[in-house]
Amino acid sequence: MHSAPCAFLILHGWQNRRPAGHWQHWLAGELAGRGHHVTYPQLPDPDRPDLQAWLGRLGTLLEAQRDTRARERVVICHSLAVLLWLHAVARAGARADRVLLVAPPSGEVIAGYEEVAGFGGPRATRAQVGAAAGSTRLVAGDDDPYCPGGAAELYGRPLGLATDVVPGGAHLDLDAGYGPWPSVLGWCLDPAARVRARNG
């Protein structure tokens, strides 16, 4: 591993108050323990999130990440935060060195929930996503109830993303058993690593 630290920004999804058992919470601790800069914020009003408020907070967080002068700036998004990132890429030209997009919900599902319907329909193009980071990887379960069309088909192919599909991973959240997740840590430490099931 390189001696210089990286800066990691970890972004949660809808109704997520960063429970201690969640893989993102675990990952934040693992990365910080290795000497990296880690930011794992509570985003505003997670039960009834407002897209503009979340975009504003993301812009501030990305600016702070740039100020760390880290060797590499990495953004890791789960669920609704994936749509947040895509909106930020399309609207504000968000930038990072590497991005991991985990378990995005489909637009159809999002439209069915009044609390988060405003996050639907990010218009990020393949070119915009490609320009936003040196590499962007998508990870999703093959049976995610929040993305019945399949994330590889709805996001991976249209956006030209390298994609890891996790068999039986569902929404890759705490309910699906995703506490400690060694292969996500592996990807954080080595960009060439693939992301697999938590016990894979």
Image: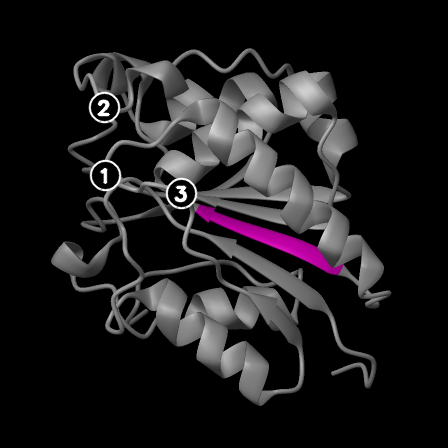
Evaluate if marks 2 and 3 touch, with contact meaning CB atoms under 8 Å apart.
no
Evaluate if marks 1 and 2 touch, with contact meaning CB atoms under 8 Å apart.
yes
Secondary element at tag 2: loop
Closer to us: mark 2 or mark 3?
3
Query: Residue 56 at what x, y percent from top left?
Result: 59, 33
Q: Residue at x 66, y 56 (%)?
A: 74
Q: Main secondary structure of the magenta part?
A: strand
Q: Earlier in the sequence, mark 1 or mark 2?
A: 1
Q: Residue at x 70, y 44 (%)?
A: 135
Segment colored magenta: 73-77
Label 2 CA crowd tier, 10 Å (few <14, some 14–19, many 20+): some
Which residue is under mark 2?
115
Q: Earlier in the sequence, mark 2 or mark 3?
A: 3
Which residue is under mark 1?
47
Which residue is under mark 3?
44
Secondary element at tag 3: loop
Q: Residue at x 28, y 56 (%)?
A: 17
Q: Residue at x 46, y 65 (%)?
A: 184
